[in-house]
Amino acid sequence: LAMGMNMPAHLVVIKSTMHYSGGVFEEYSETDILQMIGRAGRPQVFHLD
């Protein structure tokens, strides 16, 4: 989601703020988390019908 995928989402749930990368767990950046949250409720993408 954080990479700009436009998918219909009424609600985004972030289970963890960590991801596995190169053999270690790392925190997502604040920007990545805001991008994930910002995917919910986008009027041009989410439709009820």
Image (tube, rainbow, N blue to C red):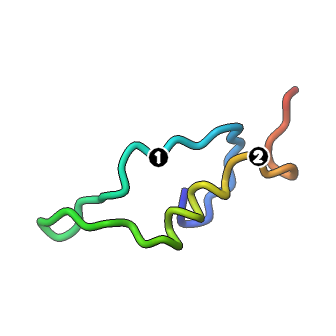
What label does residue 31 carry, if any? none
Q: Residue furthest left?
A: 23
The location of residue 45, given as percent across then percent down, is 80, 48
Q: Is residue 44 left or right of residue 8?
A: right
Q: Is residue 47 left or right of residue 25?
A: right
The location of residue 33, given as percent across then percent down, is 51, 62
Mark 1: secondary structure: loop
Callout 2 crowding tier (Cα within 10 Å): few <14, some 14–19, many ≥20: some
Q: Give the residue displayed 40% in from the left and 43% down from the top.
A: 15
Q: Is residue 11 left or right of residue 45?
A: left
The location of residue 10, given as percent across then percent down, is 71, 37
* Residue 19 placement: quadrant: bottom left
**What amino acid is found at the position of numbered circle 2 in the picture?**
Gly
For marks 2 and 1, the one nearer the N-term is 1
Q: Give the residue displayed 17% in from the left and 70% down from the top.
A: 22
Image position of 8 with respect to 44: above or below: above
* Residue 34 placement: quadrant: bottom right
Mark 2: secondary structure: loop
**What amino acid is found at the position of numbered circle 1 in the picture?**
Ile
Q: Quadrant of the C terminus?
A: top right
What label does residue 41 carry, if any? 2
Q: Residue furthest top?
A: 49
What label does residue 14 carry, if any? 1
Q: Give the residue displayed 31% in from the left and 66% down from the top.
A: 27
